[in-house]
Amino acid sequence: MVWLLGPVLLLGLGLGCRPEQATEKSPSDRGDISVLVTTGMIADIAQAVVGDVGQVTVLMGPGVDPHLYQPTTRDQRRLRQADVVFYNGLHLEGKMVDVFEALARDKTVVAVTSGIPPERLLGGGESGGQPDPHVWFDVALWKMATEVVIDTLTAVRPDQAQGFRSRGDRYLEELEGLDQYCRTRIAEVPAERRILVTSHDAFRYFGRAYGLEVVGIQGISTESEAGLRRLTECVDLIRQMRVPAIFPESSVSPAAVQRVAQDSAVRLGPELYSDALGAPDGPAGTYRGMIRHNVDGIVEALREQPQ
């Protein structure tokens, strides 16, 4: 069962069931496992692996920017009550680092990106900066995150290990098919048009995995806006490369991408989902749906002849 907390309360994620009214009795009291996650992408994994033997709660709903999110008092209480907490890590939830460190003294708190080898991460390294946290856009890396969830739940509840492993394996098979879907669809775009310009720099893993050059108008984080120089650079690139379309994102202000589209006379493609899933009853309400929605929108827009 999935619950949605924070700015958007008591809305289901469409990950297999609708939320019911909260009761005084917690899942742990009933013998079930209580899992709390930060983002909808992680919730998709957790719900698939947990199945009906526990409850999955997600803090950040559709359109919520994890870079800027700060937990409410209600969130803090739910975090303390959960048996297991999963978060993305790599400073995606930058304002919650202290919260996770404090919780880890008393319960299992795990970054799902902890199982990804450092050499597979973008950014950081010799540059001294933080690694890019948007790993879910490479489905192969998200399979590694799934393994972390399976292994963690198995360690916490070894008596339920067989169920976690079985359900997790089915989910991993679905991700394998999703990865192949991305490759097949992107191959439909002529090589010279595989340039993806988006609101912020969230799609570099996607570009590396599926063969696109990616340009983010803003940086990796959304905490600061793009300056005039950056906007001008993007306009010049779009004109020079004859980019067919550029893309706004659901969790980022559209002002910068709209400005660039206007100044470069380029089409705006469909809105992409980057740091958050879509509405629970929409096509991007699950991780798998979000990836398919993005890929389909990108392919259709970039296949068209430039204006």
Image (cartoon, grey):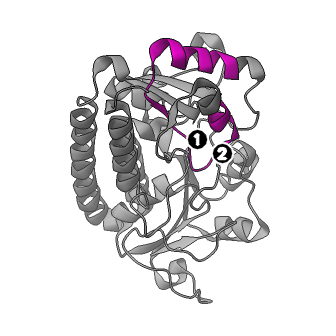
SS at badge 1: loop
Q: Which image quarter: residue 24?
A: bottom right
Q: How many marks?
A: 2
List the residue tagged with mark 1: 89
Is 237 rendered above or below residue 92? above
Residue nearest the observer in this picture, 117 or 59:
59
Q: Quadrant of the C terminus?
A: top left
Residue type beneath disc 1: Gly
Indicate left or right for 274 with 183 as reference.
Answer: right
**At 66% from the left edge and 20% from the top edge, which residue is drawn?**
129
Can residue 150 be seen at all in this image of the molecule? no
SS at badge 2: loop
**At 64% from the left edge and 38% from the top edge, which residue is drawn?**
258
- Residue 17 x %, y %: 40, 77
Q: Say which mark, if any, is on residue 93.
A: 2
Residue nearest the observer in this picture, 85 or 235:
235
Can residue 97 be seen at all in this image of the molecule? yes
Is 227 rendered above or below residue 51? above
Residue type beneath disc 2: Glu
- Residue 138 x %, y %: 38, 35
**At 36% from the left edge and 55% from the top edge, which residue is drawn?**
289
Q: Quadrant of the N terminus?
A: bottom left
Instruction: Check residue 114 for magenta coloring.
Output: no
- Residue 58 x %, y %: 56, 64
Q: Say which mark, if any, is on residue 177.
A: none
Residue nearest the observer in this picture, 199 or 71:
199
Callout 2: few (<14), some (14-19), or many (20+) C-alpha neighbours within 10 Å? many
Is 149 rendered above or below residue 200? below
Is 208 rendered above or below residue 172? above
| Cα distance in 3D space between marks 1 and 2 | 7 Å
- Magenta region, residue range: 231-259
